[in-house]
Image: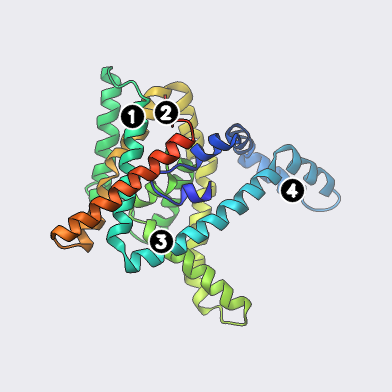
């Protein structure tokens, strides 16, 4: 799931469905309310430790902890890889992402009914919103910790939905490469600290990652519940809107490609090859999952 969530266009929620743990994941996350968290923390000290342990088991937190550790490990590895590739091969990297995102949108649209006026409005609204955000027309916090907090809150909500990629949201918000780099710096600084290094280089990236994680936790308790409520009330319309966000987000990696390339036949061939590679990779994942069904 961590590997999928770290790649735009691929959803960790889809992988959870494939592995048969999606229902358990959603049930565990749904039980994690702010009130319950406060109650558990209150019981974390003697003489209520036994009650605390029982609540951990009842809320399936051991499962979430192990799953989270596996996801974190994969995200760190992918973040390091993305940082290196961005510095050395930015055009192939974002061309590959373009293929992933484009194929993901096409596959998900395939499972939707788009003939009604309300669904067409959802298509137009989602696509236009993503396009305007990625082009900077709609203003959001562009830099600083508020932007990182917002990115964490929205991305974590997308990560638990089948077909919607959390890293795609980060690309849309212009934070994907930045956060991958900060995570890589944090891990490298932490490794040096363990080996007797200084904390000087740890504070900056560490603060960024902490703000992102806090935003993600808040988003998990709030935004993800709003999305689930919308899915329960108007599932078809909501999924159409979300998939249209994916389609409109394709402008973001294309902009990155144009910023790092100059027009030339060789460049077009390289971009085409990696776009097709990303699309094929997504199609293979779709086939393995038995078809990404947005419904």
How far apart are the alpha carbons under marks 4 and 3?
40 Å
Q: Earlier in the sequence, mark 3 or mark 1?
A: 3
Check the image and name the residue furthest to the right: 47
Q: Label 3 near label 4: C-beta < 8 Å?
A: no
Q: Which residue is mark 2?
A: 294
Q: Earlier in the sequence, mark 2 or mark 4?
A: 4
| Residue 48 visible, this angle | no
Q: Label 1 near label 3: C-beta < 8 Å?
A: no
- Helix, strand or loop at label 2? It is loop
Q: Earlier in the sequence, mark 4 or mark 1?
A: 4
- Helix, strand or loop at label 3? It is helix
Q: Earlier in the sequence, mark 4 or mark 3?
A: 4
| Residue 189 visible, this angle | yes
Q: Which residue is mark 4?
A: 42
Q: Earlier in the sequence, mark 1 or mark 2?
A: 1
**Which mark, residue 82?**
3
Q: Label 2 near label 1: C-beta < 8 Å?
A: yes
Percent x, y for residue 94?
A: 30, 55
In this picture, residue 88 sits left or right of residue 77:
left
Query: At 14% across and 58% down in the image, what residue appears?
Result: 265
How far apart are the alpha carbons under marks 2 and 4?
40 Å
Work out whether 244 lies above or below 280.
Answer: above
| Label 2 environment density (alpha carbons within 10 Å; few <14, some 14–19, many ≥20) | many
How far apart are the alpha carbons under marks 3 and 2?
28 Å
Q: Which residue is mark 1?
A: 109
């Amino acid at each position: 799931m961590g590997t999928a969530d770290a790649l735009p266009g691929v959803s960790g929620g889809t992988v959870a469905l494939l592995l048969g743990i999606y229902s358990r994941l959603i049930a565990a996350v749904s039980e994690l309310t702010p009130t319950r968290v406060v109650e558990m923390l209150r019981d974390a000290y003697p003489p209520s430790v036994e009650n605390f342990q029982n609540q951990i088991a009842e809320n399936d937190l051991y499962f979430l902890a192990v799953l989270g550790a596996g996801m974190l490990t994969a995200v760190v590895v992918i973040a390091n890889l993305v940082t290196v590739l961005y510095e050395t091969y930015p055009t192939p990297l974002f061309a590959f992402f373009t293929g992933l995102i484009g194929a993901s949108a096409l596959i998900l649209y395939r499972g939707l009914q788009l003939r009604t006026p309300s669904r067409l409005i959802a298509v137009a609204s989602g696509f236009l919103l993503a396009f305007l955000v990625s082009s900077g027309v709609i203003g959001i916090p562009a830099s600083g910790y508020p932007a990182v907090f917002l990115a964490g809150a929205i991305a974590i909500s997308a990560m638990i939905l089948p077909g919607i990629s959390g890293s795609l949201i980060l690309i849309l918000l212009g934070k994907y490469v930045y956060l991958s780099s900060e995570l890589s710096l944090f891990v490298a600084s932490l490794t040096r600290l363990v080996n007797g290094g200084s904390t000087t280089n740890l504070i900056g990236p560490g603060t960024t990652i902490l703000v992102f994680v806090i935003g993600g936790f808040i988003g998990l308790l709030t935004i993800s519940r709003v999305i689930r409520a919308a899915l329960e009330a108007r599932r078809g319309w909501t999924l159409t809107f979300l998939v249209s966000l994916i389609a409109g987000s394709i402008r973001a990696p294309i902009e990155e490609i144009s910023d790092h390339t100059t027009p030339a036949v060789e460049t077009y061939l390289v971009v085409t090859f990696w776009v097709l590679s990303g699309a094929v990779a997504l199609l293979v994942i779709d086939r393995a999952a038995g078809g990404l069904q947005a419904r």
